[in-house]
Amino acid sequence: MEQSKITFSFGKNWKDYLKTVSKEEIDKAKYDIEEWLGTNFVSGKTVIDVGSGSGIHSLAFYLLGAKTICSFDFDKYSVEATKILWEKEGKPKNWIVSQGSILDKQFLKSFGQDFDIVYSWGALHHTGAMWEAVDNSINLVKSRGKLWISLYAEGPNYSKDLALKQRYNSASPLGKKGMIYKSIARIMLSRLRHFKNPFTWNEKISRGMNVYHNIVDWLGGLPYEVANEDEVLRVCRKKGLILERIKVKEEGAANIYVFSLPINTEKA
């Protein structure tokens, strides 16, 4: 898919977000993992975090007792962000942080194993080759393991949203700030109309983000691809995966999928 020049770094945005991250947000990430996978499911499991971003979810897996966590991201600043949390935990040997791409099969072979949990939150649709990234992620799942991914939902506004992101990436630093402030102004006005305090607009939201950093993430997020749930289910079922849970969102948000892989004779 052809994309315009990318001037946005997810990692720089994540590093800025980490300046405000709280224990409550980390606890929320842990709770969310257990809500989706089950209480105590992570303990003793091998985990790979594809596109680790801020590292908050890798940290949550670590705190929930994962046997090993392999975190990687293509963006060097995301790697730095993840390492900040890794270092704060005392550089645990069972948590490995590296730079690499889900599209690089040689890099993926360097892990030397498949994983009980293959996790990728909002990353595969930013690779520029989403379906290849999905396929490579599936190939990392161990027999009886789980694939937990989120992908932007398809909708009629894709071209409009893509053009917005392209404008942001083409804008000057001042232009980028203007687009951010315009988004903030719309949120404040909406809150005012609903009799809410407009000055408390920068609320913490789910999945390790606040409103401000979510705005920056949305505006800057190129490459940008989308998928409908039927496409995802078809691709994953062809690879032998069984859908366990799904949460379908509206356009502009990401659908969430949890698949399991039964005993795979090729990997057993």
Image (cartoon, helix red, strand yellow):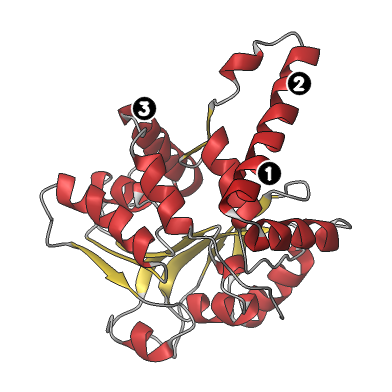
Q: Is 22 placed left or right of 91 in the picture?
A: right
Using a 10 Å C-alpha cutoff, classify the residue at mark 3 as few (fewer than 14 neighbours), some (14 to 19) or many (20 or more): few
* Observer able to see residue 96: yes
Q: CA distance from mark 3 to mark 2?
A: 28 Å
First of labels 1, 3 by sequence position: 3
Query: Residue tagged by mark 3?
Result: 24
Q: Determine whether 151 is above or below 196 in the image.
A: below
* Quadrant where the image shows the N terminus: bottom right
Q: CA distance from mark 1 to mark 2?
A: 15 Å
Determine which quarter of the picture holds residue 259. Answer: bottom right
Amino acid carrying label 1: it is: Met
* Quadrant where the image shows the C terminus: bottom left
Amino acid carrying label 3: it is: Glu
At 50% from the left and 81% from the top, the residue drawn is 136
Q: Is 24 placed left or right of 261 in the picture?
A: left
Q: Determine whether 251 is above or below 242 in the image.
A: above
Amino acid carrying label 2: it is: Leu
Using a 10 Å C-alpha cutoff, classify the residue at mark 2 as few (fewer than 14 neighbours), some (14 to 19) or many (20 or more): some
Instruction: Give SS at disc 1.
Output: helix
Front tag of 1 and 2: 1
Q: Across the whole image, how many numbered discs are drawn on residues?
A: 3
